[in-house]
Amino acid sequence: MGIIKKQSISGTIYSYIGVILGFLISGLLMPKILETDEIGLLRVLVSYSVLIAQFASMGVNTAAVKTFPVFRDKEKKHHGFLGLALLSTMAGFTIAALIYLFFKQNIINSSSEKSALFIPYFYYVIPLVFFTILFNVFDTYYRVLYNAVKGIVYKELIQRILILVTLILFYFSIIDFHTLVILYLIALISPSLFLLFELIKDKQFYIKPDFEFLDRKLLKEVFNIGIFGMITSFSGVLVMNIDIVMVNKMLGLSETGIYTVTFFFGSMILVPLRTMGKIGSVVVSDAWQKNQIETIRDIYQKSSISLSVIGILLFIGIWGNIDNIFLIIGDKYIAGKFIILFIGLASLTDISLGIAPHIIFNSKYYKNLSYFLVLFVFLLIITNLLLIPVYGIVGAAIASLISKFIFNSIKFIFLYKKFDLQPFTIKHLILLFIGAGSLFAGHILPQFNNYIVDIVIRSSIILTVFISLVYIFKISPDINTKIKETLNFFTP
């Protein structure tokens, strides 16, 4: 857990600086200065590009983590692995772009009534897809080189600073909305350019493939993993964006804008999981190569309890301040109140299993994760179709909760049956009571007139009660160690 712990801590710090910037962007500026359909447009552009990029990536990014240990050889420039990845993804991009253009009229016709604002920006999706693919390849390459932090810095920090600057320019009427969209897209593609410069600077930009290293057996293995990697990665991104696409299709850009803003608060809980998963997947892959099952068991259990502590703290902090959130973002988003609740609970089901999906995919049963994800996609589509017409945007959030609970239950049972791996102990149950007690401690406080004062006092009470009880009951050894280090730093 050493390298995971070190990079997860630094990565999480950068990620949460990004979360603060994200709050300024999605929680403060966007709701105040943009219309709901304009927010919806920006989110739909991202959703389309991410979905298409994952299809175009041909499973390379997911497969890279599993297969790179075979290629790892610094003296031989890792046998030109980066060049092979780029060749594959560029071929995928060409196919995906042609398919997107082929369905242009269908997409435009479906957008003409409720999402007309999207039509002038139809072609903007293509360059966004291209640079999304490049970022994914470069970020994955750095991850397998045990440096997951670079991508986090550029994606979570630098990109959001650029977006923030763009919104400020719009707020002061220095630019119009059309220019805002262009600068917004430039901010989105910037991380891929920064990582390209980093690779060149670090002398890691090896793009000449070593075709002699690719014997028939290795090619077959890479191809098989790539196919299922594509299904896994595409399904994984699809489940993260299908609700946005379906809300836009069924309810329009304005409702999508409300869903996007409130979804942000519920999904904040997942930030530490994404950070730990980036480096944890590489370590787990190496452990499977060496058949170190106890190492995997240790990572599974520690990731679960540590992430659960952080996730529950974030959840009770957000829900404890739910009324203050809508004082900040405005009453026009109040329809999304329970979106925050249901997406938050859905995120907790994800975070409680730690890096379970990475354990499955890097094992010999990697195909099963693809099957599970495909089932997850069908569950999401069916539940969205059933619930959105009845409950509107809240129905999409309920659909996510139901689908994720079933999906995560399947992953849990699979790992337990196949490898006798399961992450839960009595400490998880104690942690739930600690979370409930801490939320109650914040709830019984009277409401202060100034919402900023209220947020500070209420959050401080919740944080103090929660951290104190987590420390006393020794819920997570890693977190207790970090608390002790912090206390020693401030103690003479």
Image (cartoon, grey):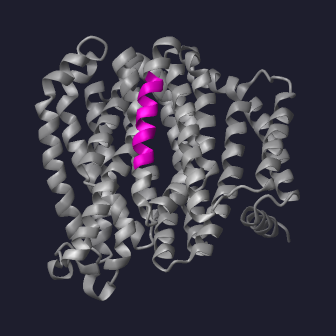
Q: Which residues are magenta?
A: 371-384
Q: Quadrant of the C terminus?
A: bottom right
Q: Residue at x 60, y 51 (%)?
A: 413
Image: 32 above or below 7: above
Q: Residue 154: tell me if it is visible.
A: yes
Residue reaching furthest to the front: 417
**In screen coordinates, is 306 left or right of 58?**
right
Secondary structure that dominates the magenta span: helix
Q: Which residue is drawn at the image coordinates 29% and 79% (left, top)?
A: 78
Instruction: Tell me the quarter of the image containing the N terminus.
Output: bottom right
Name of the residue lying farthest toward the bottom: 75
Residue 58 point in image, percent of width and height: 25, 54
Query: Residue drawn 34% across and 37% down?
Result: 46
Q: Is residue 465 magenta?
A: no
In the picture, measured across the screen, residue 77 lies left or right of residue 240, that is left
Which residue is drawn at the image coordinates 34% and 30% (left, top)? 44
When asked about the image quadrant of residue 301, the answer is bottom right
Q: From the viewer's side, name the closer residue of 318 and 388.
A: 388
Q: Is residue 176 left or right of residue 298?
A: left
Percent across and percent down for residue 11 are 53, 60
Q: Nearer the viewer, residue 402 or 12?
A: 402
- Classify residue 240 by image quadrant: top left
Residue 373 within the magenta-colored segment of the rendering = yes
**Residue 215 location (% of width, % of height):** 19, 79
Q: Which x, y percent locates residue 458?
A: 79, 34
Residue 6 lies, with reference to residue 96, above or below; the image says: below
